[in-house]
């Protein structure tokens, strides 16, 4: 018996299907039952495939929603941490600024107290100078009254004492008003402050007047 090829097998299967359908069509009840069973099976397979696809899609969506929720939570946590860090930095900057301000105010208050202390000492010096001039004049007057010194000599001495006292007072007043620094008592102002350019670092070499920079290594 000759071997059947694959084409022959397919033809035989098709022939069997045709014969089976012709047999079913000869009996309408069986044919209707077969069509209904086939339709129900196809419908069930379609529903099952759709349900499986829906379950898979729903699962993917649920996982995506969980990932999105976790991402939002992480983002909110990051924003909270950044806000906390910014708050801490602002607080530290505020404390640093407060410390710097307090230090500047304390330093300035010390400078003010020192200036006023020295100013009071200057006033005391002026009062002592006035007292010394008055005592000197009193001694001269007493000497003139008892004729220990001549009247002309007494007049010259009193004039000299007055000129010296008045000159010292004028000098102290002028120095404090126009020369003394308004912030530091022990510092004086110079009329050329800020008007003279800093040295250029060059010196004249030779009789031709050419200049060249000063080399610190050579000068050392």
Image (spheres, grey):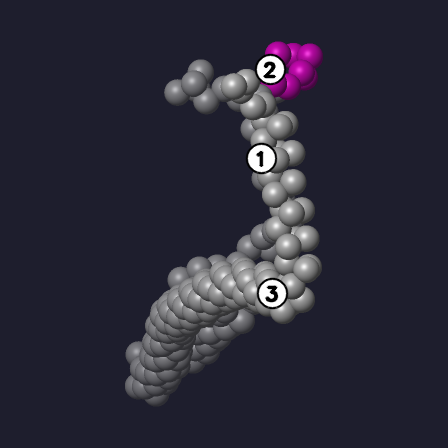
Residue drawn 61% across the image and 43% down it: 16
Distance from the alpha carbon under mark 1 to that under mark 3: 122 Å
On screen, residue 213 above or below 43: above
Q: Between tags 2 and 1, which lies in front? A: 1
Q: Name the residue under label 2.
A: 205
Secondary element at image label 1:
loop
Q: In which quarter of the image is residue 41?
A: bottom right
- Asked whether the residues under the numbered discs 2 and 3 touch, taking CB atoms below 8 Å apart as contact, a structural biologist would say no
Residue 175 shows in this picture: no
x, y percent for residue 143: 32, 82
Q: Does the magenta stretch include residue 27?
A: no
**Residue assigned mark 3:** 30
Residue 108: image location, x then y, percent: 41, 71
Q: Which of marks 2 and 3 is in front?
A: 3
| Magenta region | 206-212
Sequence-wise first label, 1 or 3: 3
Disc nearer the start of the sequence (2/1):
1
Kindly report the secondary structure that dominates the magenta region of the rendered protein.
loop
Q: Quadrant of residue 46?
A: bottom right
Location of residue 216 with respect to 145 vertically, above or below: above
Circle 1 residue = 199
The spot of residue 182 in percent (x, y) is 50, 69
């Amino acid at each position: 018996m000759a071997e059947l090829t694959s084409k022959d097998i397919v033809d035989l299967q098709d022939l069997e299907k045709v014969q089976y359908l012709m047999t079913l069509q000869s009996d309408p009840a069986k044919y209707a039952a077969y069509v209904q069973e086939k339709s129900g099976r196809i419908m069930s397979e379609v529903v099952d495939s759709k349900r499986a696809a829906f379950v898979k899609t729903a699962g993917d969506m649920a996982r995506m929603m969980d990932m999105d929720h976790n991402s939002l939570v992480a983002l909110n946590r990051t924003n909270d941490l950044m806000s906390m860090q910014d708050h801490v930095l602002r607080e530290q900057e505020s404390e640093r600024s407060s410390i710097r301000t307090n230090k500047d105010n304390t330093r300035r208050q010390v400078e003010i107290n020192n200036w006023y202390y020295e100013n009071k000492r200057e006033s005391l010096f002026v009062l002592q100078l006035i007292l010394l001039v008055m005592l000197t004049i009193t001694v001269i007057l007493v000497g003139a009254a008892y004729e220990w010194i001549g009247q002309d000599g007494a007049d010259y001495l009193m004039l000299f004492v007055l000129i010296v006292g008045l000159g010292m007072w004028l000098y102290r007043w002028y120095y404090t008003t126009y020369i003394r620094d308004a912030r530091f008592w022990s510092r004086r102002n110079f009329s050329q402050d800020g008007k003279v350019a800093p040295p250029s670092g060059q010196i004249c070499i030779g009789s031709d007047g050419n200049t060249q920079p000063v080399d610190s290594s050579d000068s050392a």
